[in-house]
Image (cartoon, rainbow, N blue to C red):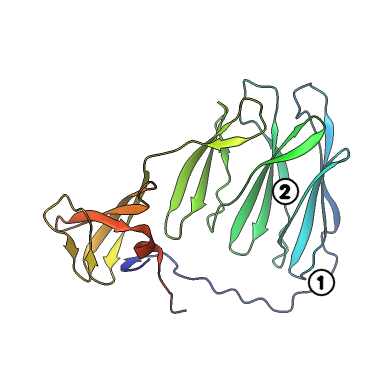
Amino acid sequence: MTGIKRHLLPICTLALISGIAAGSAHAGEIQRLRLALNGNGVEDVVILKTSKANEDWRRRFTVEIARSKYSGDYFSADGDTPTVREIAIDRNRKERQLLVDTPEAGSCVFHILSFASKRLTSLLRFDSGPDCNPPVPQGNGTLRILTWQGFWNKNETLRLSKDGKALVLEQQDKFWVNVAGSAGKGLTLQGATCASRDIPLGTFVSVKFFEPKGNRYMLESADGGCGWLPAEEILHQKANC
């Protein structure tokens, strides 16, 4: 992020991939489960398969229930494979959902699927970033997800719709960030409510929270300065790797 250097936070990741073989490792069926997902108490066979993709370092995955399928691709150079398991977003309902975890280079992508009317449907697909934090079903009809924002994790809540066919994002006025570091250059904060608006080079600063409506961050300095900084000014940084 421009002007702020967070301690112990990797600024860039350099992936060197060599000698990747196209081979048929992990091809075919890798998981088979019997689950009652659609609320009628009848168990269905859930099959997770993998197959070749266009690129040697990627593979396709397919989730099958009877004649219904859901497919995607994933990063396979490290030998990791997808997994599938049952989750319960709302324990007061009989329906259950599937959570598919697929590896990516330096992150994880999660897929949440429902199975109703003999059809697999995608409720959500999201990249959790380098921490690979899985979604957390609360059991009360909501789901919490953490998504990487470049130097912090955004904690969001989604609610399962009444018909169970969608996950709807619950709007939030602000997101707590609480990341600290030193200013890599002088910063001018906007709309300051404290004594100082200018943050000199090297000043210890805290990014307190993010306001999505204004697309801006609230910063505080150790010398009593505070104010807003546009998100693009914080997020725009070209790392010298």
Quadrant where the N terminus sits is bottom left
Residue 212 pos. (x, y %): 39, 47
Q: Is residue 152 above or below residue 65?
A: below
Task: Name the residue located 67 percent from the left edge and 46 percent from the top edge.
Answer: 111
Q: Dot 1, crowdedness within 10 Å: few (<14), some or many (≥20)?
A: some
The residue positioned farthest toward the left in the image shown = 195
- The residue under label 2 is 83
- Tell me the element at label 2: strand
Above or below for 191 versus 65: below
Q: Are marks 2 and 1 in contact (CB under 8 Å)?
A: no
Distance from label 2 to label 1 (Cα)?
Answer: 21 Å
Looking at the image, residue 233 sits to the left or right of residue 133; the answer is: left
Q: Quadrant of residue 160?
A: top right
The vertical placement of 6 against 177, above or below, is below
The mark that comes first in sequence, 2 or 1, is 1
| Residue 62 point in image, percent of width and height | 80, 50
| Residue 100 place in picture, x, y as percent | 69, 46
Q: 235 or 105, which lies in front? A: 235
Residue 17: x and y in percent read 66, 76
Q: Residue at x 29, y 71 (%)?
A: 184
Q: Say above or below: 118 vs 186.
A: above
Q: Nearer the viewer, residue 207 or 116?
A: 116
Quadrant of the rendered image containing residue 118:
top right
Quickly name the residue at label 1: 22
Dot 2 amino acid type? Thr
Amino acid at circle 1: Ala
| Residue in view at x 78 percent, y 54 percent | 61
Could you tell me which secondary element the residue under label 1 belongs to? Answer: loop
